[in-house]
Image: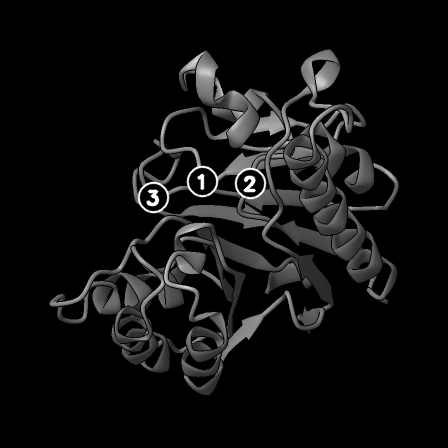
């Protein structure tokens, strides 16, 4: 942490599956030599099974730096979220859905996020009940994020999401699925706070860096995205 700078290694979309053996242990050891904090931005497991979470948990236990993150849509698949969370918490992963965290003078706030589209093509709460419920899910996630950001006391803040807050970092994905990859409503909330950087995953195609309308840097840290490190994780200095 030279000169008060915190180096964050961030990645997403690990998609740990049953039958794998220590899939990220060596990578986490490499990260611990290069960064001060490890951030995992959702889709930690492939089907949200506690058995998958236990495999990742063993690798997290061997990580020598603090680890924190949010869950993604895949982590919800089996409907066993509480079991998943318990397994990961017991391994030392700080889940931002539960509380904000502080490491090295940087506050971390986050939530999963949700879809809904971007800009003038953003889905509105009108018409069928199903549409209104979809938009309500996004608004609920935005409220969780805003509440978390209000609770951060540090002047330097990183926001962690799974869904994208901007189009910039998901360019290249099929146009038909863009509304399901994120929402501008997330960026609108972030721009109301002094956030230094945002990380997300979910989109396996896209580009590493973009910005919110307010100019805050946004990074797509999905493991499948090409990054300046040439590795599955990005390194971001806060």
Q: SS of the residue at dot 1?
A: loop
Gap between marks 3 and 2, in whole Å?
14 Å
Classify 10 Å Cα crowding around label 2: few (below 14), some (14-19), many (20 and above): many
Q: Is residue 141 visible?
A: yes
Location of the N terminus by quadrant is bottom right
Front position among marks 3 and 2: 2
The answer to whether 51 appears left or right of 235 in the picture is left
Pick the front one: 57 or 5: 57
Disc ID at residue 202: 1
State the image quarter where residue 30 is shown: bottom left
Gap between marks 3 and 1, in whole Å?
10 Å
- Single out the residue that lies furthest toward the bottom: 90
Mark 2–mark 1 contact, CB under 8 Å? yes
Pick the front one: 155 or 218: 218
In the rendered image, which residue does mark 2 sit on? Answer: 163
Front position among marks 3 and 1: 1
Disc ID at residue 223: 3
Q: Residue at x 35, y 82 (%)?
A: 61
């Amino acid at each position: 942490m030279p000169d008060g700078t915190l180096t964050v290694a961030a990645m997403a979309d690990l998609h740990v599956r049953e039958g794998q053996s220590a899939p990220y242990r060596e990578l986490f050891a490499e990260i611990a030599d290069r960064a001060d904090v490890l951030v995992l931005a959702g889709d930690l497991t492939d089907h949200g099974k506690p058995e998958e979470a236990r495999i990742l948990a063993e690798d997290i236990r061997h990580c020598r730096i603090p680890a924190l993150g949010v869950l993604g849509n895949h982590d919800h698949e089996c409907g066993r979220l509480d079991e998943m969370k318990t397994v990961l918490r017991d391994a030392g992963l700080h889940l931002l859905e539960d509380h904000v965290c502080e490491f090295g003078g940087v506050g971390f706030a986050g939530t999963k996020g949700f879809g809904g589209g971007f800009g003038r093509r953003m889905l509105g709460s009108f018409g069928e009940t199903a549409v209104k419920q979809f938009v309500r899910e996004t608004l609920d996630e935005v409220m969780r994020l805003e509440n978390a950001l209000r609770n951060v006391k540090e002047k330097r803040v990183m926001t962690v999401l799974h869904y994208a807050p901007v189009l910039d970092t998901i360019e290249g994905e099929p146009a038909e699925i863009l509304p399901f990859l994120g929402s501008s409503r997330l960026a609108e909330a972030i721009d109301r706070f002094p956030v230094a950087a945002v990380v997300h995953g979910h989109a396996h195609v896209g580009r590493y860096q973009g910005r919110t309308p307010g100019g805050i840097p946004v990074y797509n840290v999905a493991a499948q995205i090409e990054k300046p490190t040439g590795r599955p994780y990005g390194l971001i200095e806060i």
